[in-house]
Image (cartoon, rainbow, N blue to C red):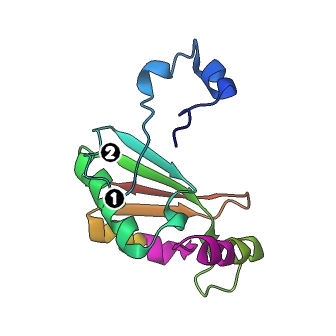
Amino acid sequence: MSRPLLNAAQRRGLVGSALLSLVVIAVVVVLRSLPVSSADLYALGRILHDWSEAKVRELVGKIYDALPPGGGLLIAEKLLAPDKTGPLSALMQSLNMLVCTEGKERTLAEYEALLQEAGFGEVQGRQTGQPLDAILAVKS
């Protein structure tokens, strides 16, 4: 089954944008042997929580290998509290991921471990109080 990369509203939003020349839109297919194209920044929103630790390691490793020194990976996911007791929205999303996919929501420490294992030197995360939190990893 094939579907368009962008819907009509998304295409209209990008047309004429000064940022369009700086944006590379790519479909990341996890566990394909295709290499990840080189870029200065990758952004993954609501992607990593769908996948097992092994598949996340593989995808993050491919992105790390494609980044130049100083390049970054921005992850937008719900972050669990360090003791995994909340927030409630992240716990409910994690339950949904466990039932519907092979993934789960993670703590910042879990993301730090995955990203540092891939080689990222600097990892910062913030709970935003919004539907998604942010993690930024920078390649040394």
Question: What's the CA distance linking mark 2 and mark 1?
Answer: 22 Å
Image location of residue 31, percent across then percent down: 33, 58
Question: In the rendered image of this protein, does residue 72 appear above or below residue 49?
Answer: above
Question: In the rendered image of this protein, does residue 85 appear above or below residue 30?
Answer: below
Q: Earlier in the sequence, mark 2 or mark 1?
A: 1
Q: Report if residue 139 is visible in the image.
A: no
Rendered image quadrant of residue 42 = top left
Q: Residue at x 35, y 73 (%)?
A: 54
Compare residues 84 and 6 and report the one nearer the observer.
6
Q: Would residue 57 be counted in the magenta stretch?
A: no
Image location of residue 73, percent across then percent down: 41, 51
Residue type (three-letter) at the residue carrying disc 2: Gly
Q: Which residues are magenta?
A: 94-111
Residue type (three-letter) at the residue carrying disc 1: Leu
Rendered image quadrant of residue 14 = top right
Which residue in the protein does label 1 denote? Answer: 31
Which residue in the protein does label 2 denote? Answer: 71
